[in-house]
Amino acid sequence: MSARLPNPQRAKIHRNYDVEEAARICGVHRNTVRQWIKQGLPVCDDRRPMIVLGPELRAFLQAKRTRNKCPCGPGRIYCMRCRTPKVPAGNMTDYLPSTSTGGTLAAICPDCGSMMYRRVSLAKLASIRGELDITMTQAHSRIGESAQPFVNSDYKQEHQL
């Protein structure tokens, strides 16, 4: 089904859901909803079918979503492999511009050696920097903007007399 967390807004507060309906609106398997009930999702009573109130389902999903967030502080970049925010190896990062107002910080994880990335805007770069040594790189030009195209390309320039 879905690898992402379910959207809490899909649970309507004026409705009640059985396990099957809750699984359908959340995009998960019904056993996942049963696992949520074991983890503390309140149900109306102990009888079958188990009924979950809409506001309770929404609150449970919002709490689950906020509990799983791990914000990065200044000078830290989130490592997907280690699943924690880390200070990059040697406090060194590269800023790779993608637009005129923002880009990506790229660095190496000190523990696992994988690449770490963090999207930033130029306006907030000073507050995110912390102790990091950021190398600003130039954006790559596009092939159409080049006066001398690459030799192995199919791009042909028309000569006008």
Image (cartoon, helix red, strand yellow):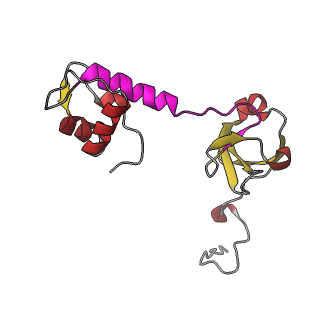
Residue 148 in picture, x, y percent from top left: 73, 71
In the rendered structure, the answer to whether residue 155 lies left or right of residue 73 reads: left
Q: Residue at x 55, y 33 (%)?
A: 69
Q: Residue at x 13, y 31 (%)?
A: 48
Q: Is residue 120 above or below residue 95?
A: above
Q: Residue at x 37, y 37 (%)?
A: 6
Residue 100 in view, yes or no? no
The quadrant holding residue 140 is bottom right
Residue 8 in picture, x, y percent from top left: 36, 29
| Front-most of residues 39 and 153 | 39
Question: Does the magenta segment cover residue 45?
Answer: no
Outermost residue toward the left in this view? 48
Question: Does the magenta segment cover residue 59?
Answer: yes
Residue 55 in picture, x, y percent from top left: 29, 19
- Quadrant into which the C terminus falls: bottom right
Outermost residue toward the front in this view? 46
Residue 120 in view, yes or no? yes
Outermost residue toward the bottom in this view? 152
The quadrant holding residue 14 is top left
Residue 70 in picture, x, y percent from top left: 59, 34
Q: Residue at x 65, y 41 (%)?
A: 84
| Front-most of residues 89 and 138 | 89
The quadrant holding residue 73 is top right
Magenta segment range? 52-78
